[in-house]
């Protein structure tokens, strides 16, 4: 008599030694409201390499939302939510402007997007820097 057994393949979740994390990180949503001559909030801070979804709304009229270095140029229409997903790859401070004329204060309608290095990258840079020092 011959017995055969069939084993199902293990998934990464079944294998405690697996280095693969199959659970995706949740994407952070950030609400940005545009109204005549301002964006609220006036500054947001993001982490380099982390994906975020910007939820853009207008309270009064069509406004623009342009950040050339991040590849963003869209319209924000009143009564609608415009969703933009971005993943900034370079740390820095970027100015967002309204690129649709919306009245006399239009030129001052700006906000800042600050992109910081991730904590893991910063601490890794500190470790490399410390390990490169030579004592005499």
Image: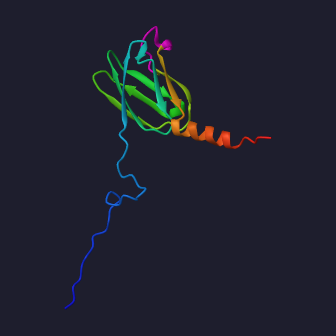
Please tell me whether residue 124 is drawn above or below residue 64 in the rendered image.
Answer: below
Residue sitting nearer the eye, 35 or 85 = 85
Q: State the extent of the magenta-drawn residues as a range.
A: 100-108
Count of all numbered marks drawn on residues in the image: 0
Res 37 quadrant in image: top left
Assess whether residue 103 is covered by the magenta stretch: yes
Q: Quadrant of the N terminus?
A: bottom left
Q: Quadrant of the C terminus?
A: top right
Residue sitting nearer the eye, 18 or 99 = 18
Which color scheme is applied?
Answer: rainbow
Seen in the image, is 4 located left or right of residue 64?
left
Q: Main secondary structure of the magenta part?
A: loop
Res 35 quadrant in image: top left
The residue that appears at 64% across and 43% down in the rendered structure is 128
Assess whether residue 118 is covered by the magenta stretch: no
Q: Position of residue 76 (x, y in %)?
A: 37, 25
Outermost residue, left direction? 1
The residue that appears at 27% across and 70% down in the rendered structure is 8
Outermost residue, bottom direction? 1
Residue sitting nearer the eye, 120 or 114 = 120
The residue that appears at 21% across and 85% down in the rendered structure is 3
Q: Position of residue 110 (x, y in %)?
A: 48, 18
Outermost residue, right direction? 136
The residue that appears at 38% across and 18% down in the rendered structure is 34
Res 32 quadrant in image: top left
Q: Position of residue 132 (x, y in %)?
A: 71, 43
Outermost residue, front direction? 136
Q: Position of residue 52 (x, y in %)?
A: 41, 35
């Amino acid at each position: 008599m011959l017995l055969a057994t069939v084993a199902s393949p293990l998934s990464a979740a079944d294998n405690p030694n697996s280095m693969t994390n199959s659970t995706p990180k949740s994407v952070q949503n950030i609400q940005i409201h545009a109204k005549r001559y301002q964006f609220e909030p006036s500054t947001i801070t993001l982490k380099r390499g982390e994906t975020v979804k910007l939820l853009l709304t207008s309270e009064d009229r069509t406004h623009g939302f342009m950040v050339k270095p991040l590849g963003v140029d869209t319209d924000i229409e009143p009564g609608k939510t415009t969703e933009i997903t971005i993943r900034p790859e370079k740390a820095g401070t970027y100015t967002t402007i309204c690129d649709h004329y919306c009245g006399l204060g239009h030129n001052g309608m700006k906000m800042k997007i600050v992109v910081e290095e991730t904590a893991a990258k910063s601490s890794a840079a500190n470790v490399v820097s410390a390990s490169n020092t030579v004592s005499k």
